[in-house]
Image: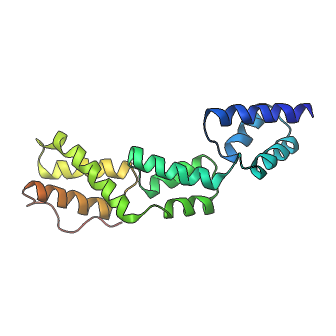
Amino acid sequence: MEGEAKAREVCLRLLAAAPRTRAQLAEALRREDVPDEVAERVLGRFSDVGLIDDEAFARAWVQSRHNGRGLAKRALAAELRRRGVADETVNGAVEALDPAQEERTARALVARKMPSTARLDPAKRTRRLMGMLARKGYPPGLSYRIVRESLAEEGTDLDGLPDDPPVD
């Protein structure tokens, strides 16, 4: 029982600070030298009572990181996998992100970055803006289309830029 009390205390302390995945809690228990069978019992009980819910964690993570950082599905999925969320849960959470919302977010990111690139030539601006979107996980085709449309709306001469987007 002593091991279970320690495991519960570790889990509760971590969960009080921030939501955690089951894998993150299991790793913390391993670092604290909690025996695997004790850890599994405590984690199972915490799951049963709803203190650990990887699906809810993944949904909240996707919404928070998309709205806060502008991350796209690909980047969000990678972050969740690094936190030990199962692929099926990751896929369900990122697929819940509306493609239209993802495009609106990408457009807002480009609009926010465009003024700082105004003095650059169109090719360099395109590379910078696409690079910013790529780092946030947006696919090249979508990024190129949004950047071209944003530059055109601004009145930038697009001569010299290819008409076709990079292959996704």
Q: Considering depth in this image, is 164 or 33 the residue closer to the camera?
A: 33
As drawn, the residue found furthest toward the front would be: 49
Q: Considering depth in this image, is 141 or 161 the residue closer to the camera?
A: 141
- Quadrant containing the N terminus is top right
Q: Please indicate whether residue 157 sits to the left or right of residue 82 in the image.
A: left
Q: Considering depth in this image, is 73 or 105 the residue closer to the camera?
A: 105
Residue at (41, 48) in percent of width and height: 67
- Picture quadrant of residue 140: bottom left
Residue at (63, 52) in percent of width and height: 85
Residue 11: x and y in percent read: 74, 36
Task: Indicate the colouring scheme.
Answer: rainbow
Q: Is residue 154 above or below residue 14?
A: below
Q: Is residue 139 visible?
A: no
Q: Please indicate whether residue 54 sits to the left or right of residue 6 in the image.
A: left
Residue 8: x and y in percent read: 80, 35
Residue at (72, 50) in percent of width and height: 50
